[in-house]
Image: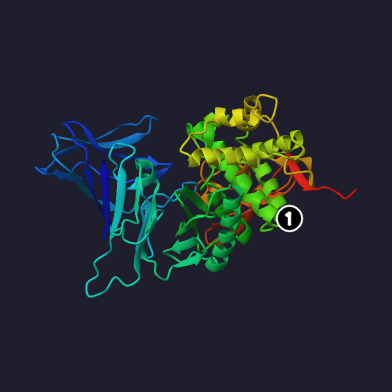
Amino acid sequence: MTHLLVTLTVEPPGIRVTWLLDGVGLNAGDTIGRLPVSIAGAPTLRLDDQMVTAQDHLGAVPLLMSVSADDDGEPRRSWRVGRSTSGPIELSYLAESVTEEPLPATAPLELRAEGGGLSGVLKCFLVLPPGPEDLTFTLRWNGPVRKGQSAGGWMGVTSLGEGDGRDGELAGTGLELLGDTYVMCGDLADRHHRDGELSTWWLTPPGIDVEAFSSRLGTTYQVMSEAFDAPAHPYRVFLRTHPHRGANASAHPASFVMAVNPANPLNEASLYETVAHELVHEWLHLDGPAEEVTWFSEGAADYYSLVLPFRSGLLDEESFLRAVNFEAREAYANPRRDLHLRQAQKVFFSDFLTHRLPYARGMFYLADLDARLRSATSGEQSVDDVVRFVVRQRRQGRRTSVEQWCAQVQQILPDAELPILDSLVFTGTGRPGEDSFGTRFVQETIQVPVLDLGFDPSTLMTRQIRGLVPGGAAERAGLREGEIVDLPRYPDIVRLDVGDVLTVGVTRDGQAVRTAIPLTGATAPVPCWVRRSAP
């Protein structure tokens, strides 16, 4: 059996990575390790062949690094051995933390330093052997050496567990699990909070009430595990900081990470929606290319992060409708609303507005399917039953494709499901039925301004004018390329109605100036849900 022992030693200015691969023999020219240039828009490490060393029983193993495209056409660094190897192979290099400012719509994956510690997902800084995929692995920590000081409150925490790994608590099977493992290390002894099976960890004070946050999240985790018929187990939430408005997050095995801005934290409702969304990722996945299944992983996360808390009383009706109607505007008044999801996937991590399409379309498809299933079975079955099938399949190690999803739906409903899925999700031409989200609500249609503001949508997050369109609304309002602007929060902008104005603040020559962009351009019909009036 092939085994990989990974040791992470904290040393300035990052982490010394050393791994020992046992049970594999390599011939000259074989690949010993690979590392993508970026992952989901997040940078990895800039390593050349001199920075990575290898040795075996015979001594140093020469390495040659090259960059080529992987199976998806993405650039990837690869290291090949210059001679045949003998016995276990050791690889070593220093992983330095990324210092460039993170992009606004990028998940917090890269190795970063903050608060005297480090955090990141392993696949962003761990050179992984090419296989076998089912190898076993063990992870170990070596804490920093502090002259004249004890380790104090230093801890290493990962998706796999807590501790230094010497008791075998940080072990598993499979390169995918290893690469997806999130790690955080630093003075964490007093920078975490536990609530039942759920714990929250941070290196820098996140600017929120962590105890209240963890308590509500812990209850939500229990509600979701029961809804998906999946037992609860230890689950970790990693918080780290970024300079942007809003929050970016990423799901990992039995954990997720969220980047927040302590100087401009999310309000309680937005924060809860974000973290509840990430919790759902623990259970719900379809198998297949990203352009075919992202709608499910992200759409189901949006759907159940609202529906389950609402059913259990953790989310009130006003907050529920506010979130649903906000997402309807994001989907159906989006300037990118006519994109096919396969086109959208190509710019998923670079275009802020396009990024939201699979989330919203997936959510409204599931709400529509739920209504159709309940109607056809007089309330005996719902979308929850189809989702539990997916969860059971995954627990048994079986894959579930889009075709299998549709086949499972068609065991209950008579019509072909793929054309409906194509309309509501892939092309986006369809709209959810009137009874989506239940008969408690009634669906109306309103005209909503299309937010074509005359600058690149990243401006809404970075607050710096980029991609100013000549003659566009922003230029007509007097804004200039590169200016730093004061804008309302993105959700507040999306909720503006026809005839409203977007007020923008800008400082010129030391003077604060406010200008207005009137929302008098194109509009789009958008479904809106309200409470049904009593008869």
Identify the image quadrant of residue 11: bottom left
* 504 or 415, nearer to the observer: 415
At which x and y percent is residue 169? 35, 57
Q: Which residue is mark 1?
A: 318
At which x and y percent is residue 514? 63, 56
At which x and y percent is residue 529? 76, 45
* 388 or 481, nearer to the observer: 388
> Residue placed at 35% from the left, 44% from the top?
173
Question: Which residue sits furthest bottom?
Answer: 148
| SS under mark 1 | helix
Q: Is residue 198 left or right of residue 525?
A: left
Q: Is residue 505 left or right of residue 162?
A: right
Q: Is residue 109 left or right of residue 489?
A: left
Q: Please tell me how many numbered marks the rendered image carries.
A: 1
Whether residue 423 is situated above or below residue 22 in the rendered picture: above
Question: Which residue sits furthest left?
Answer: 58
Classify 10 Å Cα crowding around label 1: few (below 14), some (14-19), many (20 and above).
Answer: few
> Residue placed at 32% from the left, 72% from the top?
152
Q: Is residue 419 visible?
A: yes
> Residue placed at 41% from the left, 54% from the top?
159
Whether residue 267 is situated above or below residue 281 in the rendered picture: below
Whether residue 474 is situated above or below residue 163 in the rendered picture: above
- Colour basis: rainbow
Q: Is residue 31 left or right of residue 401?
A: left
At which x and y percent is residue 410? 65, 28
Quadrant of the rendering where the N terminus is positioned: top left
> Residue placed at 34% from the left, 40% from the top?
37
Q: Is residue 480 visible?
A: no
Question: Which residue sits furthest right?
Answer: 535
The amino acid at mark 1 is Glu
Identify the image quadrant of residue 192: bottom left
